Image: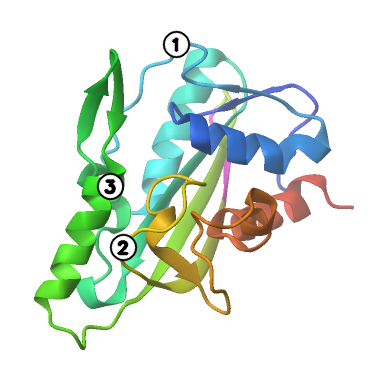
């Protein structure tokens, strides 16, 4: 039987404020006290994995070991069909780090432009289908872990639209929708996103009857 999370504090293994807000909102109904690895001053481990699962486990296990608390890590990314699945696990790396008022962040507009430039180089008939993948890994300080995977299919648009969300959200339109993730109301996005898909599986196993 899969080990379950209790009502104890849960470390969200991220330094990304947008991701922390999204995950905390999804976990809110279950009474978990969430705190980010960034807020605890934990270092970011080197993501040496070649899959979303490997990188999620690296982050979750590092946060659990460093904090002595259960930890949840999300490794997610954009996979573009015409680009052979890239950027995939290197999604964040395509947004090179920039410094703004002393805070290291990522230039996501540059990253979106990089994807668009590669698609345009393929010609006007280039396939624009893509998907967001998400892997959630839960790790406990004693080394036990569990993994949940989610996906949402869609297509890419240009130029970017919307100021909500984060990362590549302003250029991604989910199947059956007209708005980009960057334009959607957060609750509407949470209902259909790759993260929501993975969370539904986590909730069923962790909090279901």
Between residues 133 and 139, which one lies in front from this camera angle?
133
Q: Are marks 2 and 1 in contact (CB under 8 Å)?
A: no
Q: Nearer the viewer, residue 59 or 78?
A: 78
Q: Mark 3 against mark 1, which lies toward the viewer? A: 3
Q: Which residue is mark 2?
A: 159
Q: Which mark is residue 41?
A: 1
Assign a secondary structure to mark 1. loop
Counting the numbered discs, the total is 3
> Is residue 144 visible to us here?
no
Find the magenta span and give its range: 143-147
Residue 109, disc: 3
Secondary element type, mark 2: loop
Relative to residue 39, is residue 196 drawn left or right?
A: right
**Which sits earlier in the primary sequence, circle 2 or circle 3?**
3
Q: Identify the image quadrant of residue 46.
A: top left
The figure's colour scheme reads rainbow
């Amino acid at each position: 039987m899969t080990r379950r999370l209790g009502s104890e504090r849960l470390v969200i293994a991220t330094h990304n404020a947008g991701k922390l807000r999204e995950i905390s909102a999804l976990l809110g109904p279950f009474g978990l006290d969430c705190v980010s690895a960034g807020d605890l001053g934990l270092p970011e481990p080197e993501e040496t994995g070649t899959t979303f699962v490997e990188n999620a486990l690296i982050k979750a296990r590092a946060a659990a070991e460093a904090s002595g608390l259960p930890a949840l890590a999300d490794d997610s990314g954009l996979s573009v069909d015409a680009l052979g699945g890239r950027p995939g696990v290197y999604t964040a790396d395509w947004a090179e780090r920039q410094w703004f008022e002393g805070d290291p962040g990522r230039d996501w507009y540059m990253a979106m432009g990089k994807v668009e430039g590669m698609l345009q180089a393929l010609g006007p008939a280039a396939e624009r289908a893509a998907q967001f993948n998400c892997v959630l890994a839960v790790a406990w300080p004693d080394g036990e872990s569990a993994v949940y995977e989610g996906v949402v299919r869609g297509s890419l648009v240009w130029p970017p639209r919307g100021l909500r969300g984060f990362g590549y959200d302003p250029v991604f339109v989910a199947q059956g929708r007209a708005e980009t993730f960057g334009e959607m109301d957060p609750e509407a996005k949470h209902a259909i996103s790759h993260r929501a898909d993975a969370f539904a599986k986590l909730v069923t196993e962790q909090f279901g009857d």
